[in-house]
Structures are given as structure tokens and as C-alpha cells.
Image (spheres, helix red, strand yellow):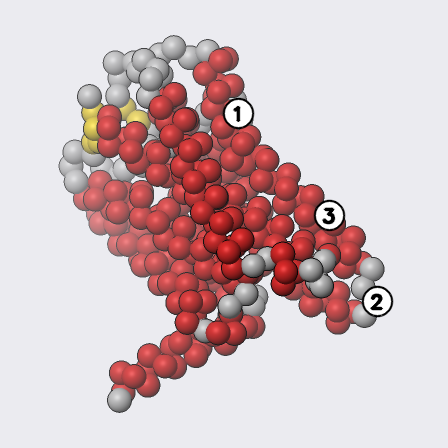
Amino acid sequence: MEFVFLAYPSCPELRILSFVGVSLVYGLIITGNILIVVPIHTDARLCTPMYYFLGSLSGIEICYTAVVVPHILTNTLQSEKTITLLGCATQMTFFIALGSADCFLLAVMACDRYVAICHPLQYPLLMTLTLCVHLVVASVVSGLFLSLQLVAFIFSLPFCQTQDIEHFFCDVPPVMHLVCAQSHIHEQAVLVAAILAIAVPFFLITTSYTFIVAAVLKIRSAAGRHRAFSTCSSHLTVVLLQYGCCAFMYLRPSSSYHPKQDQFVSLVYTLGTPLLNPLIYALRNSEMKEAIGRVLTRNCLSQNS
């Protein structure tokens, strides 16, 4: 059994234009996230839990885009845009797993900011490197476990004879639209997985920032308040981008499924968010900008010598 993707352009000129555009964005995503990962792992000034989590987030986003973007590029140029049942299930498994890990890690980063701002004296004792590694691993394992349960459930359902997916890749809403035995139980099962991966982490983030805002408002100096808020502003911007798109796609009834609208939103969180994340963190963080500058300077000097 094979699925056929219908969202790709049929006009040859438009296909080439789409290929060039997606390739350019994908190259910028890989470059931007590598420029975040490398300084964090090579610069001693960035050996803190906040930057360790940021580097892990960029690493996850590199893998996250690698699951679907090369597939999109290949299908853009191919005449037959098909994928096997097993290939579709595998792609969905890793896409949902890494996307969920992304959401869990953003919640971990919010908790890290809460401890740093609300309990600064205990922060070095609580947020050890061992705990940071465990939290990152737990985020990835939890995302994979949740994804395996969801994908196993979806692909155990009977599919209709039409195998046309009105999308660029195997995502949950368009694949669920092909299931013949649609019922409230199936819809609720998918909704429960979405709540665990999106709503629960977002609740933790909201709670953390509620305590953070309360603590920051107690700081008497304006400079202290500005510094506290500046450490959180980049993270909060990324959270709103990520969770906004994910909530729109997955926390809604299947009756509100609109293929064209969903295709656009999927491109935003598949290409747009991973592209904007490094820009947001690099442009709004002076330490990160300086570290990237040092890495680029070292590379230039080594090439010249």
C-alpha cells in the first residue's frame, strides 16, 4: 500500500522555484542551528544550563527538519510523489517524537529560568550538568514513547481505498482524514496525545512564567528587572511561535480540517520556526552573538594561516 501526496505543484517552473526556495531555507536552518550548537560546546563562557538546553534544542531542530525537508525536496522534483505505508509510519513517528521533544524541552527551559530567577542561590546546586543531561534525555524519550503509541494507534485503523494525502508529508491530521472508521473515540485518542505533548508543557511554562513575573516585579532596580526579563524574552518568543502552530494543528476537532490552510501552517512550523529560533536567540542575546563572532573569527584565522 502506498500513499500519494497531492500538495506539490505540478507546473515544472513552480516545482523548480519551490525546490530552490525550500533548499535555501533548509540551508539557513542547518547553518543557523549549527552556529548555535558549536559555540555552546566549544566556548567555556557558555557552559551553563541555559545554554546547554539551547544547544540541545537546536540539535533537536536539526533532526526534526531532517525528517521531512529532504523528503519534501525529493518529492518536489519527482513525478511520482508516493510513500509506502511503513515509510509513512516511520516518518510520522520521528516527526511527532522530535516535535514533542521540542515542546518538552521548551518546558524544561522555562523551569530552568524559574529556578535561576526565583531561587538564584540554590540554582548552581539544583541545576547540575547531570540533571540537565537527564532532562534532555527524558524529553526525547518521552516524545518517542508518546509518538510510538500514537502512530501505532493511527496505523492500526482501517484506511479508505483512496490513498491521496493532501499534504507535503505524513502528518497526523491529513493521515487521520483517510481513516474510514472515524469516531469520537479515535478523535479523542489523538486529542489526548496532543494534550500530553502540547497543553501539559504549555501549562508548566505558563506557571513558571507566572512565578517569574511575580519575582521580577519585586526587584527594585530597573536594570535588574530588565536583565531578568531579557533572559526570558527570547525563550518566550520561541514558545509562542512553536505552541501557537502546534495548538492550531493538533488541539482541534477533525471537522475543522482544511487542507490548504493546514499545508501553510505545516510549512510555518516545519521551516519557519526552526529558521527563526536561531535568529531570535542570536539577535536577542549578546553573549550568544559574541560567542558566534569568536567561532567565526577562529575559523577565518585558521583558514588564512
Element on which disc 3 rests: helix
Q: Residue at x 20, y 25 (%)?
A: 2
The answer to whether residue 259 shows anywhere in this view is no
Q: Residue 29, percent across and down?
A: 37, 57
Label 3: few (<14), some or many (≥20) within 10 Å? few
Residue at the spot of label 1: 192
Disc 3/disc 1 C-alpha distance (Å) = 25 Å
The answer to whether residue 39 shows anywhere in this view is yes
Amino acid type of the residue that numbered disc 2 sits on in the rendered structure? Arg
Q: Residue at x 75, y 65 (%)?
A: 225
Q: Residue at x 30, y 36 (%)?
A: 91
Residue at the spot of label 2: 220
Is residue 192 depicted above or below 204 in this figure?
above
Mark nearer the N terminus (3 vs 1): 1
Quarter of the image where one finds residue 98: top left
Say the numbered circle drawn on residue 210: 3
